[in-house]
Amino acid sequence: MYMSAFPQGEPLYFVEYAPGCISVMPQSVKDRRVGREMDIDPDNEEEFDAMRFIFASSVKVEVDTQGRAKIPKYFREIAGIKKEVVTVGLTDFIEIWDRDRFEEKRSQMTLREANAIYYRKRREAQAGHEQDE
């Protein structure tokens, strides 16, 4: 997988972020979306378990001299990657899917349904932003 689409010099991470696929995020995106640190009560085992899971589910991407990265076995397994992959750009990160798994997921929603959900969320966000002003 080639990694030249991301900001030069910023570390990249494989992240277990959304079910069924692997996310690849620059560090700034990972920090914003997944968090850099949490204020955890040391006596709260549930919070520590959550923090442990979140931070253990990301691994720094090692890029070779030709700009390629090998996906670690753990991430290939959680994404069910067998042979062919599909990459999907999502604003500030990408997802890597097993082709068959992606096609199955994609068949569960029409483009019309996807647009309705996307634009409804967008309108809600705009309405919330206008109320803040």
Image (spheres, rainbow, N blue to C red):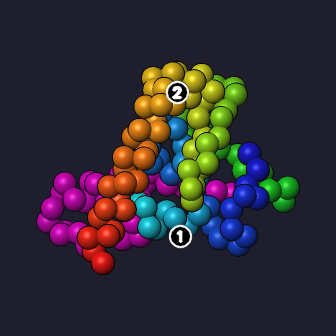
- Of tags 1 and 2, the one toward the viewer is 2
In the image, residue 105 sits, relative to residue 52, either above or below, namely above
Q: Which residue is found at the position 43% from the left and 31% from the top?
A: 113
**Numbered disc 1: secondary structure:** helix
In the image, residue 67 sits, relative to residue 43, either above or below, namely above
Indicate whether residue 54 is drawn in magenta.
yes
Give neighbour class at mark 1: few <14, some 14-19, many 20+ (Cα, 10 Å).
some
In the rendered image, which quarter contains the N terminus? top right
The answer to which image quadrant residue 18 occupies is top left
The answer to which image quadrant residue 117 occupies is top left
Q: Which residue is found at the position 18% from the left and 57% from the top?
A: 45
73 or 16: nearer the viewer: 16
Amino acid identity at mark 1: Ser
Give the labeled residue for mark 2: 106
Q: Which residue is found at the position 40% from the left and 54% from the top?
A: 122
Give the labeled residue for mark 1: 28
In the rendered image, which quarter contains the C terminus? bottom left
24 or 53: nearer the viewer: 24
Question: Distance between the Cα atoms at labels 1 and 2?
Answer: 29 Å
The earlier-in-sequence mark between 1 and 2 is 1
Specify the segment rendered in magenta.
35-64
Among all residues in the image, which is located at the extreme left? 43
Give neighbour class at mark 2: few <14, some 14-19, many 20+ (Cα, 10 Å).
few
Q: Position of residue 118 (x, y in %)?
A: 43, 45
